[in-house]
Amino acid sequence: MGAKIKSSIDLNKLVRENVKRLVPYSSARDEFSGKGSVFLDANENPYENGVNRYPDPMQRTLKARLGELKAVNPENMILGNGSDEVIDLLFRAFCEPNIDNVIICTPTYGMYEVAAGINAIENREVPLDKDFQPEVNDVLSIVDEKSKLLFLCSPNNPTANLLDESKVVELLESFSGLVIVDEAYIDFSPGKSLLDRLESYPNLVILQTLSKAWGMAGIRLGIGLASKEIINILNRIKPPYNVNCLTQTKALELLEADDLYEEQVKNIITEREVLITFLSDLSFVEKVYPTDANFILILVNDARGLYDYLLTDEIIIRDRSKIQSLGNCVRISIGTREENEILKNTLTKFELKS
Ligand SMILES: *Cc1c(COP(=O)(O)O)cnc(C)c1O
């Protein structure tokens, strides 16, 4: 493993025709270089209030800081209004509506299928195996020349497990389209990011986000990491000012506190282990799935009953029992110590009652 690499891919064959031909929108702030002090180019209101100017369309300062944190060249990075925007951009850049298809390994994050639907792209589902690992041969057997994107989520939502790196690599080596590895939960996992594989695999796109470990779900900031060539294509079609100035400023401020981030991730992992032990002893819990994320998937005897009971104590969890292969499963996010204590109390009451 690791010896074989993919030397090149034919991006020209993957990109949509209209995207190739497109002349991107050129914003006022793109068109000058040098230093400006009197800005009369963008029809802004000149009176300073902190937000009267358009934000930097390329988010240079923010990318420099993220690049430093992740040891990545900012040219290998695109930022979006959440990773959900980056997912949508991938569809719009590479998938021809009503012609192309994408592949997802289910059960997984719901946005891939929704984005496929919005963009009129066929979504081909391949079930994960009983340990929630990708079935490489099953994936490859439904691929055709119209298969543009393969989504892998690691750690996977809602099953919580890291994907086997050797299987991901096998898919990177054999799939002719782009392989999107969504690492939204990588910070909580013992596994390593695939970031250091970007150079070996020109068809690799990694998604990360500030919404989970970094605690910034409210500002919507997602990160796409890929070759310069792929990033350039996505930059051509992104809305010019897709990351607003409040988000850029707040992210820069909170990214300074990387010690706090590390401490919180550590606490969440500790709390997760406490909760796993607690859940494993409950008689109505039939299985606690292994987790590499900040949530736990459990199989219970009556998912809806548990969900409704917790709700009467104002505790909200995610009922995943309608998903095929996840019958009677619920997903529980790790809260603060205090929140987890409240959860445990109510679970104990439910245990005594049932
Ligand atoms: C939460 C989550 C994200 C984050 O999406 P944002 O739009 O960045 O908030 C991405 N992928 C998965 C699998 C997630 O669970």
Image: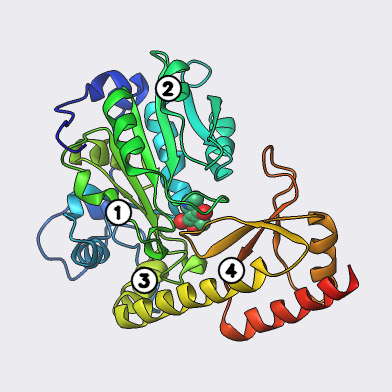
Residue 260 in the image: state x and y as whole percent. Answer: 36, 82
Alpha-carbon span between mark 1 and mark 4: 24 Å
Closer to the camera in the image, 195 or 353: 353
Depicted 201 relative to depicted 299: above or below: above
| Mark identifier at residue 122 | none
* Residue receiving disc 3: 251
* Image marks 2 and 4: residues in contact by CB distance under 8 Å: no
Alpha-carbon span between mark 2 and mark 1: 24 Å
Q: Nearer the viewer, mark 3 or mark 4?
A: 4
Which residue is found at the position 17% from the left and 32% from the top? 5
Residue 24 in the image: state x and y as whole percent. Answer: 30, 36
Of the residues under marks 1 and 4, which one precedes in the sequence?
Answer: 1
Quadrant occupied by the C terminus: bottom right
* Residue receiving disc 2: 137
Which residue is found at the position 44% from the left and 33% from the top? 91
* Residue receiving disc 1: 193
Q: Is residue 252 left or right of residue 138?
A: left
Within 8 Å of ligand 1, the CB of disc 4? Answer: no
Alpha-carbon span between mark 3 and mark 1: 21 Å
Which amino acid lies under the numbered mark 1 shown in the image of this protein? Ser
Alpha-carbon span between mark 3 and mark 4: 32 Å
Of the residues under marks 3 and 1, which one precedes in the sequence?
Answer: 1
Closer to the camera in the image, 334 or 328: 328
